[in-house]
Image (cartoon, rainbow, N blue to C red):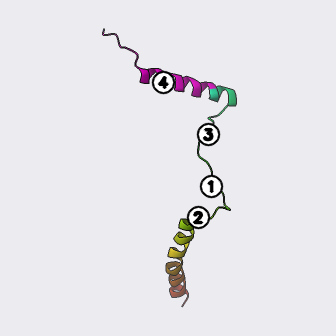
Amino acid sequence: MKQRRITEQDYIKANRKASREEEIAQHGKPVNRGGVRKSKKKYDRNSEKATLKRLPFLYLGSVAKSG
């Protein structure tokens, strides 16, 4: 059987896996690694424009159904 060499990537992957398992053992669940949450107070022009784009179609559809 051919012996396989341990590469740097294999070493890093094994360390990450061990660290993750240790974290789960300490906290009892996976810990969030990132993902900064967006504040509701922060101005976001794209979401404002997205709601405006949908308004006329929803409004016209509701007028046609009720009239």
- Label 2 crowd (10 A; few <14 / some 14-19 / many >=20): few
SS type, badge 1: loop
Mark before the other along the chain sequence, 1 or 2: 1
Q: Bounds of the magenta span?
A: 2-22
Kindly identify the amino acid type of the residue bearing the numbered disc 1.
Lys
Question: What label does residue 32 carry, if any?
Answer: 3
Kindly identify the amino acid type of the residue bearing the numbered disc 2.
Asp
Q: CB of mark 4 within 8 Å of CB of mark 1?
A: no
SS type, badge 3: loop
Q: Where is residue 64 in the image (x, y as percent from the top left)?
A: 50, 87
SS type, badge 4: helix
Give the residue number, with chain letter if any, for mark 1.
38
Is 21 placed left or right of 8 in the picture?
Answer: right
Mark before the other along the chain sequence, 2 or 4: 4
Q: Which of 2 and 60 is in front in this view?
A: 2
Answer whether residue 8 is magenta in the image. yes
Give the residue number, with chain letter if any, for mark 2.
44
Mark before the other along the chain sequence, 3 or 2: 3
Q: CB of mark 1 within 8 Å of CB of mark 2?
A: yes
Give the residue number, with chain letter if any, for mark 4.
12
Mark before the other along the chain sequence, 4 or 1: 4
Kindly identify the amino acid type of the residue bearing the numbered disc 4.
Ile
Name the residue rendered at 63%, 28% in the picture. 23
Q: How far apart are marks 3 and 2 (CA)?
A: 25 Å
Q: How far apart are marks 4 and 3 (CA)?
A: 20 Å
Q: CB of mark 3 within 8 Å of CB of mark 2?
A: no
Residue at the extreme bottom of the image, as rendered: 67
Is 6 placed left or right of 55 in the picture?
Answer: left
Name the residue rendered at 65%, 61% in the picture. 42
- Label 4 crowd (10 A; few <14 / some 14-19 / many >=20): few
